[in-house]
Amino acid sequence: MKRIVTIQDISCLGKCSLTVALPIISAMGVETAIIPTAVLSTHTMFSRFTVKDLTDQIAPVTEHWKEENLDFDAIYTGYLGSFEQIDLMKDMFDKFRTDSNIIFVDPAMADNGKLYPAFDEAFAKHMATLCAKADVIVPNVTEASFMVGMEYRAEYDEAYIKEMLQKLSALGAKVSILTGVSFREGMTGVMGYDSTKDEYFFYEHKKHPYSYHGTGDIFSSTCIGAMMNGFDWKEAVKIAADYTAECIRLTIEDGKLQWYGVHFEQAVPYLLKRIGK
Ligand code: PXL
């Protein structure tokens, strides 16, 4: 069985970060070790939330794992709360990188043209230095614009997205995957660039009329879970996009418009069928 470690916060209620990564990747048949970076009462899109920072636990956990000679087929970072946590992740990558494992960074920090409440532009630039050490990165268009210093646009053409992918790729990752790429009304998708092959890939699907929190984390968890199941990054992107869209569809169908997160649980059978399990 493949083993992955994912490092992000626990938002106790809110269906994002570890409370989606752990169940989704585990359901895909991949052992999922975690390092919780903080415990929050809810994610930060609620008007108020509590936070207990766990930064001081990160080095002791990774040092113990090193003593036990543990290794991981993938290291996946999501929402990180501080410059110090980003630096600790760099150390962790240096310690646990092997010839064959995948370092996967989701620079979860912004959406819809805005940084999340806890962050500023300097943080985004620092996150770019973590992306530089990854094999695969999965920013959305907003996160990418802050990291590469391009103006955020709600409407754009293919040239804008390709320029963004080139600039992301120049940070250093082999594969850059840009989510929330929409070239036409009613459709959304994902465009990726593989710098080792100078190859672009675009996948689009119908855009649902509502957007929900936590869907970026669901996309990333599914994408790395699919890669751990032997799918190449392009197939993994399709699986992750389709599963995320299915989660949104089921949430809308339920009719209660639960804004803070989607019904990812009900779509797990769809996901398992999709990956042939
Ligand atoms: O889904 C990203 C995310 C993860 N963790 C926390 C968040 C957010 C987005 O706002 O606040 C704590």
Image (spheres, rainbow, N blue to C red):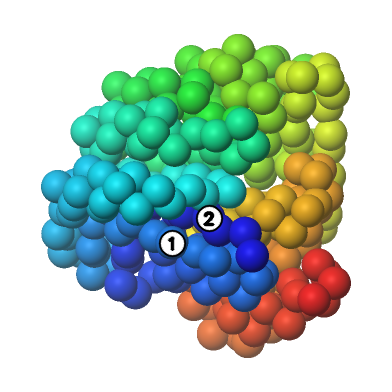
The structure residue drawn at horizontal position 56% and vertical position 47%, both measured from the top left corner, is: 74
The amino acid sitting under disc 1 is: Ala
Q: Is residue 125 left or right of residue 229?
A: left
Query: Within 8 Å: ligand 1 and the Cβ of disc 1?
Result: no
The spot of residue 36 in percent (x, y) is 30, 58
Q: Is residue 270 left or right of residue 106?
A: right
Q: Quadrant of the C terminus?
A: bottom right
The structure residue drawn at horizontal position 26% and vertical position 51%, both measured from the top left corner, is: 64
Image quadrant assignment for residue 240: bottom right
Q: Is residue 205 left or right of residue 212?
A: right
Query: Within 8 Å: ligand 1 and the Cβ of disc 2?
Result: no
* Above/below status of 111 relative to 171: below
Determine contact: label 2, label 1, CB under 8 Å: yes
Callout 2 crowding tier (Cα within 10 Å): few <14, some 14–19, many ≥20:
many
Question: Which residue is label 1 attached to?
Answer: 33
Callout 1 crowding tier (Cα within 10 Å): few <14, some 14–19, many ≥20:
some
